[in-house]
Image (cartoon, rainbow, N blue to C red):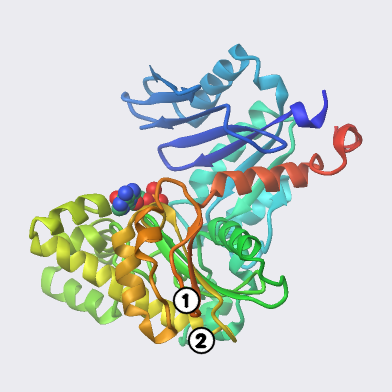
Amino acid sequence: MSWSARLVLVVNSGSSSLKFTVLPCDGGEALVSGLAERLGSPEARLVLKRNGDKTVVDVPDADHSVALYRIFAHLDGDGLLDRIGAVGHRVVHGGERFSESVRLDEAVIADIEAVSALAPLHNPANLVGIRACLAALPEVPQIAVFDTAFHQTMPPAAWAYAVPDAWRRDHGVRRYGFHGTSHRHVSAEAARVLGLPAEDHGLVVAHLGNGASATAILNGRSVDTTMGLTPLEGLVMGTRSGDIDVGVVTHVAAVTGKSLAEIETILNKESGLLGLSGLSNDCRTLEAAAAEGHAGAELALEVFVHRLARHIGGLATSLPRLDALVFTGGIGENSARIRAMTLARLRVFGFELDAEANAATFGGRLGRISRGAGPVALVVPTDEEGLIARDAVRLAGFSDGGDDALAAAQ
Ligand code: AMP
C-alpha cells in the first residue's frame, strides 16, 4: 500500500473519555471521528461521526480498552483499520524531558510516567489510552505529542518562579506552558500567511477557548507564555480563575475550612467566566446575556478582556517587535466582540480594527481584522489534531520518503 493511501489515527485520552480522529496520512479531511465518554460507568457510550452522520452506541461499563476495541471494530467494518499506518497521541505534560514529539517505546512511557506527578489528572489518563492502543496495534508506530514541548525554548527568566530554587530542583516547580500544539501550528500559519521572514518576526498568539493561554513567539520559538506549572495560571478561562494571589487560597481556607484540594477544584472548575457571571462558562451565552443587561455576564467579559490585554502587553516585552497578534480557539476564531474589545484596550500598540472584516471572520475563516500601519491582528483557525497527525506521520517515516520509507519502517 502506498503511504498516501495510509491513514493516521489521532487519540486524545482523558480520565473518563477518549476522543479519536482518523485522517489521511497526506493531509485532508477526517474520514471518521468520535468520542467514547463516561468510560467506566454504566452510561458509557460511543459517538461516531462519518460522512456527516452521527451514530451513538451504548457500551455499558466499557473501559478505555473495551472502547478502543469497539472503535477498531467499526473502523474494520469500514475497511479503514488495515490502512492505519501511524497513531498520534496527545500527552498533556512532558516536563523538562520532552522538547519535541517522540516515538513511543517503553523508555518514553517510563519518562511520561516519571513526570506524571506534574499532571496527576491528565498524564495517567493519556497513558491508559497509549497502552490500550499499543496493545491493540502493536505493529503500528505510535507517537506522543506533548502540550508542553513547544514552550521548552522559553528562557529561564520566563520559566522560573521566584521561589526557593530547591522547589524546582527537587520537585520540578517551574513554568511549563500548555496548548503548545495550537501555538506552534497557529504561529507557523500566521508567519506563512503574512510572508514574515522565518528568522525575523515576533508574534503573540491568543488561544481563547474554554481553556485559554497566550504566547510570545520569536522566529517560530516560544519565548513566554501565560500558563505555568499547570494550566491554571494566566488568562481568565471558562471555569479556571487564571492568575490569583495565593493569599486568596489561604484566606478562603481559613474562613471556610475548605481543604487545599477543594479550593483547587473550585479554582479549576467553578471560577473563570462561570464564577464571575454566576451564569455560564460559555462565551456565546454570556454575550447574549450581556446584550440583555445581565450584569454578571458583562463583568465576566470585561474581566476576561482586561486580563487578556494586560497579558498580551506583558508578552510583547519578550519580543523586539510585535508584527502580529493572532486570535485562535473557539472564542478567538468566532467572537468579534471579544476581539474588538481586546484591540480597543491595546491602543498603545497602534492596532486599528477593521470592523467589517472582524464581523465577517468566524466559523473557521482565516483573515486579517486590522488595517493601517500598526501591527496586524489576524484570526487563524487552530488545528491541534492536524498537527498531531502530521508529527505522527513524519516520525513514523511516511511523510517524505514515500513507499521506501514505509517499507523501511515496517
Ligand atoms: P473551544 O474550547 O476552543 O472549543 O472554545 C469554546 C468557547 O468558544 C466557548 O466559550 C464558546 O462559547 C466559544 N464560542 C464558540 N463560538 C462562538 C461565537 N460564535 N461567539 C462567541 N463565542 C463562541
Tell me if mark 1 has few (under 14), some (14-19) or many (20+) residues whose alpha carbon lies within 10 angstroms of its own: few
- The residue at 54%/72% (across/down) is 172
User: What is the quadrant of residue 39 in the picture?
Assistant: top left
Give amino acid for label 1. Answer: Gly
- The residue at 54%/56% (across/down) is 182
Question: Of label 2 and label 1, which has the lower sequence position?
Answer: 2
User: What is the quadrant of residue 209 in the picture?
Assistant: bottom left
- Gap between marks 2 and 1 measured at Cα: 22 Å
Q: Residue beneath label 2, please?
A: 317
x then y, percent, for residue 208: 39, 60
Q: Does any portion of residue 216 appear in the rendered image?
A: no
Give amino acid for label 2. Answer: Thr
Up the image or down, 387 lies above or below 136; here it is below
In the image, taking residue 235 as reference, residue 184 lies left or right, namely right
Residue 372 bears which disc, if any?
Answer: 1
Tell me if mark 2 has few (under 14), some (14-19) or many (20+) residues whose alpha carbon lies within 10 angstroms of its own: few
In the image, taking residue 313 as reference, residue 268 lies left or right, namely left
x then y, percent, for residue 352: 40, 75
In the image, taking residue 148 as reference, residue 397 lies left or right, namely right
In the image, taking residue 124 as reference, residue 114 lies left or right, namely right
x then y, percent, for residue 219: 67, 74
Give the position of the N terminus as an image quadrant: top right
Up the image or down, 410 lies above or below 230; here it is above
Q: Closest to the observer: 269 or 339? A: 339
Which secondary structure lies at badge 2?
loop
- Depth check, mark 2 against mark 1: the one in front is 1
Up the image or down, 34 lies above or below 184; here it is above
User: What is the quadrant of residue 200 in the picture?
Assistant: bottom right
Q: Closest to the observer: 299 or 150? A: 299
- The residue at 50%/82% (across/down) is 316
